[in-house]
Image (tube, grey):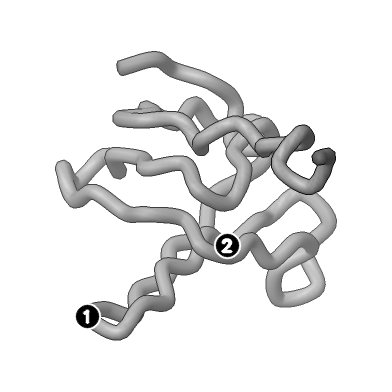
C-alpha cells in the first residue's frame, strides 16, 4: 500500500477510503459538481456502482496500482 495525492490516482487503481471501503477506480470525474479542485472516483462494474468525491489535495491510500499499459502488444 502507498499513499498519493488524489490528483495522481488513475483509472485501474484500487484505493482504500477513510471509511475502510475499497474502490476499484474505473472512471474519474474532474471538476466534480463544478468545483475546480474536486474529483469523483467512480467504480462502475457489473457487480458494483459506487462513487466518492475528494479534493485533489487529499491523500489517498492505493491498495494496488493500475497495471502499466502494454505499449508493445501491437508491435509484431
The percent position of residue 30, horizontal first and vertical second, equals: 75, 61
> Could you say which is closer to the camera, residue 56 or residue 25?
25
CA distance for labels 1 and 2: 19 Å
Q: Which residue is mark 2?
A: 40
Q: What secondary structure is found at the residue carrying circle 2?
A: strand
The percent position of residue 17, horizontal first and vertical second, equals: 30, 43
- Label 1 crowding class (10 Å Cα cut-off): few <14, some 14-19, many 20+? few
Report the number of numbered marks: 2
Q: Quadrant of the N terminus?
A: top left
Report the residue at 48% width, 67% height from top: 42
- Mark 1 vs mark 2, foreground winner is 1
Q: Is residue 64 left or right of residue 65?
A: left
Report the residue at 37% width, 54% height from top: 24
Q: Quadrant of the C terminus?
A: top right
Q: Is residue 74 left or right of residue 25?
A: right
Q: Which residue is mark 1?
A: 47
Q: Is residue 25 above or below residue 47?
A: above
Using the rendered view, name the quadrant where residue 9 is placed: top right
Amino acid at each position: 500500500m502507498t499513499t498519493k495525492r488524489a490528483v495522481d490516482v488513475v483509472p485501474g487503481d484500487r484505493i482504500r477510503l477513510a471509511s475502510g471501503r475499497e474502490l476499484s477506480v474505473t472512471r474519474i470525474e474532474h471538476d466534480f459538481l463544478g468545483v475546480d479542485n474536486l474529483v469523483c472516483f467512480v467504480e462502475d462494474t457489473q457487480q458494483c456502482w459506487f462513487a466518492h468525491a475528494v479534493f485533489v489535495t487529499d491523500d489517498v491510500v492505493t491498495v494496488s496500482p493500475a497495471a502499466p499499459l502494454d505499449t508493445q502488444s501491437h508491435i509484431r
